[in-house]
Image (cartoon, coloured by chain):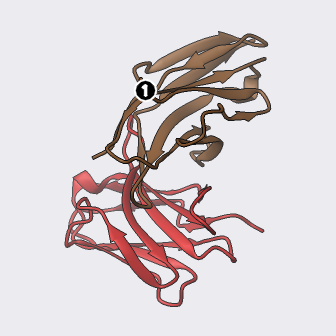
Amino acid sequence: DTGVSQDPRHKITKRGQNVTFRCDPISEHNRLYWYRQTLGQGPEFLTYFQNEAQLEKSRLLSDRFSAERPKGSFSTLEIQRTEQGDSAMYLCASSDRGEKLFFGSGTQLSVL
Amino acid sequence: AQTVTQSQPEMSVQEAETVTLSCTYDTSESDYYLFWYKQPPSRQMILVIRQEAYKQQNATENRFSVNFQKAAKSFSLKISDSQLGDAAMYFCASQGGSEKLVFGKGTKLTVNP
């Protein structure tokens, strides 16, 4: 059990560019979550997958955001046409029954 | 809608002493769960303790315990025998009616040697 892995740890991009983050959950976990955390705030829920099905999405997830979990294993979160307001820590978590979430160390996005 | 409020932006405690972090919440769900998460400088969120709302008994995990007052919608965290490694941001969270966790803004805990 190597824990939840997120790549990259840091991403700096220019406004208007597209970025993609990857999350590898704990191998036997069928539930995967994305959260966003801005400075001085608690994490905010973005979306949830059970296996490959995206079952819940926050209204925070605008049309520029898309998440996938094609084979029910790793997941990707893509942000198109990035804006400065997208600058945040993007956290991924996984769980087997939803009772305890295991978080990764996050991807810190800076949009210049 | 669920809301979680942490009214203490920062707290400090002397090593080996006890500290209590406050949290209040609001939810329309009858079945829900409450959590305390710790976020050290590494930024990885770690579950400290979990409380099922239908259980009257307060949850305990080693030096960590909660005071769950359902009628008052209060869920405080007590850390006994504080250690330097307890220094971190602490987030209170609720979950009910969906898989979504709703977090408070956090309390920064400093442990003084």
Residue sticking out furthest to the bottom: A71
Chain A's shade in the image? red
Which image quadrant for residue A30?
bottom right
Amino acid type assigned to the residue bearing label 1 in the image:
Ala
Residue depicted at x 27% and y 63%:
A14
A2 left or right of A5? right
**Percent x, y of residue B19:** 64, 15
**Percent x, y of residue B4:** 38, 35
Residue depicted at x 49% and y 18%:
B10
Foreground pick, A64 / A18: A64
Residue depicted at x 54% and y 43%:
B54
Foreground pick, B105 / A54: A54
**Is the residue A77 above or below the residue A92 in the image?**
below
> Label 1: how many residues lie within 10 Å, few (<14), some (14-19) or many (20+)?
few
A14 left or right of B72? left
**Is the residue A96 above or below the residue B56 in the image?**
below
Foreground pick, B69 / B100: B69
Query: In the structure shown, which secondary structural element does the residue marked by tag 1 occupy?
Result: loop
**Percent x, y of residue A99:** 60, 57
Q: Quadrant of the C terminus of chain B?
A: top right
Residue that numbered label 1 is attached to: B71
**Is the residue A52 above or below the residue B94 in the image?**
below
Which image quadrant for residue A27?
bottom right
Foreground pick, A99 / A107: A99
The chain letter of the brown chain reads: B
Residue depicted at x 47% and y 48%:
B32
What chain does badge 1 belong to?
Answer: B
**Percent x, y of residue A43:** 42, 47
Q: How many marks?
A: 1
